[in-house]
Image (cartoon, grey):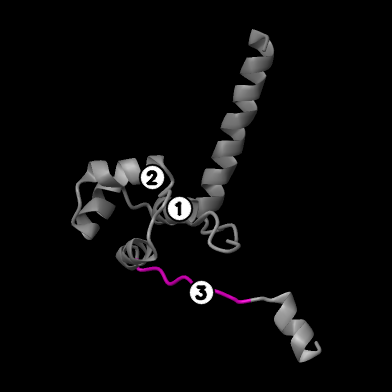
Amino acid sequence: MPALLRLRHLGLLGCYRQQSYERLKRGEFEELENLRGLGHLLISIRIAQGVSQRELARRLDVHESQVSRDERNEYFGITLERAIKILDALDVRLRTKVESESLRAMAGV
């Protein structure tokens, strides 16, 4: 990629990240589907609340490097139990909505 194009790309990426960060600070989060993106959501909630990795680690009674490593991997492979502990530490309640085409069809809706 030519240098000028790369700089433009990086500039747009920086602008996108800034807009994304501003949405997080306003508490605007993307919806999850079948829990895909849960790790990204956990990170987003922490950022939106202004909680540092160090503070989250303190609340979870783990080392800061553990939170840093987990977030770097977007909590890949996280257990539901661990996700609940993080949500509790951030004082957040996650609600779910179950939708099923086959259940609707059976109910005649």
**Residue appearing at x 57%, y 64% in the figure:** 34
Image location (x, y in percent) of residue 1: 67, 12
Q: Which residue corresponds to mark 3?
A: 95
What amino acid is at disc 1? Gly
Q: Tag on residue 39?
A: 1
Residue 94 covered by magenta stretch: yes
Q: Going by the image, does 15 lie left or right of 42?
A: right
Q: Are marks 1 and 2 in contact (CB under 8 Å)?
A: yes
**Residue type, mark 2 in image:** Glu
**Label 1 – label 3 distance at C-alpha:** 16 Å
For the residue labelled by badge 1, is the local secondary structure a helix, a strand or a loop? helix
Q: Is residue 51 above or below residue 35?
A: above
Q: Which numbered tag is attached to residue 71?
A: 2
Magenta segment range? Answer: 91-98
Left or right relative to 101: residue 19: left
Identify the mark nearer the N-term, 1 or 3: 1
Q: Residues within 10 Å of mark 3 (few under 14, many from 20)?
A: few
Q: Name the image quarter holding residue 9.
A: top right
Q: Amino acid at mark 3?
A: Arg
Nearer the observer, 32 or 5: 32
Q: Position of residue 101 (x, y in %)?
A: 74, 76
In the visual, does 15 lie left or right of 90? Answer: right
Q: Is residue 101 above or below residue 22?
A: below
* Mark-to-mark CA distance, 1 and 2: 7 Å
User: Which of 90 and 106 lies nearest the eye of the viewer?
Assistant: 106
User: For the point 47% across and 70% down, which residue is it?
Assistant: 94
